Amino acid sequence: MTAQILDGEVVAAAIKADLAQRIEALADRGITPGLGTVLVGDDGPSANYVAMKHRDCVELGIASRGEHLPASATLADVVAVVDDYNTDPAVDAVLIQYPFPEGIDYESALLRLDPAKDADGLHPVNLGRLVMGVKAPVACTPAGIQALLMYYEIPIAGRHVVIVGRGLTIGRPLANLLTLKQPGANAAVTVVHTGVADLGAYTREADILISAAGTPGLITPEMVKPGAVVVGAGVTYEGRTVVPDVVDEVAEVASWMSPRLGGVGPMTRALLYRNTVEAAERAAYPDQP
């Protein structure tokens, strides 16, 4: 058996094509969706990530504005930028890039953000709405994983999903998302982590296995049920090399598998733009549910 590829580039392109039509409809009303970013310090991967967002915005027709603060900035400096974005009608959604330099509290900056402008879907208000099953911006990587599975018509309802990793950006919101009684969800979800005694005993029970632990080479073929769907959402950087949680040999056991590059990453970015466009639509059509 050789796994079929869950190609995130293909799915992200389809999402962007849909967004292009929605952006055009907003343009007919004189509205341009706007994304604001906050970058603090000199973290290379973060700077590249934010720059990529601004390039994509130009291609999509989303207006983008970026604020890059030095590593010497204070929380008050960051909050001032967030407050400015909150009151700027041209900015529909805001990305507060993580991590911050040591000494600046990221959570405090996030709490200052207007939840309606939360591009990442990580504000506590929006995470709470997700738990309640109320419509709100959803964390980008979990929503991207769900969209990836749905595009390839992977059955989710009633299946056993095992998520390795309990982090705030992927594991916990993904578990809540996939248990909701709605299309692309309604699964039985187990969340485990690298601290359990026998991780393989859990992962071998998964119909859909999603690793978001950020532990290089964590998931090996003997830990995967034959025919399972495997999504690698956790990566680690060793220098400039991306090392995934899931080893390549898992493709010989799985039925579907996300690739080392071009799987979940493009989906995360595409869902950020979708959150931005949806924020603009909420402002443009306030009477719509």
Image: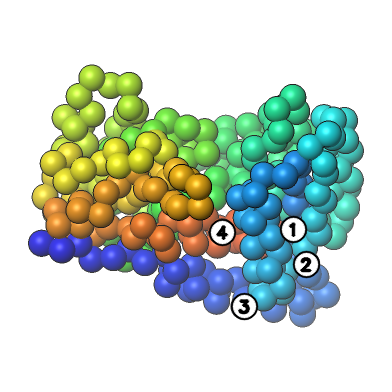
The reply to whether discs 1 and 2 touch (Cβ–Cβ < 8 Å) is: yes
- Quadrant including the C terminus: bottom right
- Sequence-wise, which precedes: disc 2 or disc 4? 2
Secondary structure at badge 1 equals: strand
Q: CA distance from mark 1 to mark 3?
A: 18 Å
Residue 229 percent across, percent down from the top left: 24, 53
**Dot 1 crowding, Cα within 10 Å, few <14, some 14–19, many 20+:** many
Observer-nearest of 273 and 42:
42
Residue 126 percent across, percent down from the top left: 61, 38
Q: CA distance from mark 3 to mark 4?
A: 18 Å
| Mark 1: amino acid | Leu
Residue, disc 1: 35
Q: From what the image shows, is residue 127 above or below residue 254? A: above
Residue, disc 2: 63
Q: CA distance from mark 1 to mark 2?
A: 6 Å
Q: CA distance from mark 4 to mark 1?
A: 13 Å
Residue, disc 3: 21
Tell me the mark number nearer the camera, choosing from 3 and 2.
2
Name the residue: 76% across, 77% down.
27
| Mark 2: amino acid | Ala
| Mark 3: amino acid | Gln
Q: Is residue 177 left or right of residue 46?
A: left
Snapshot quadrant of residue 69: top right
Residue 37 percent across, percent down from the top left: 75, 52
**Dot 4 crowding, Cα within 10 Å, few <14, some 14–19, many 20+:** some
**Dot 2 crowding, Cα within 10 Å, few <14, some 14–19, many 20+:** some
Residue, disc 4: 269
- Sequence-wise, which precedes: disc 1 or disc 2? 1
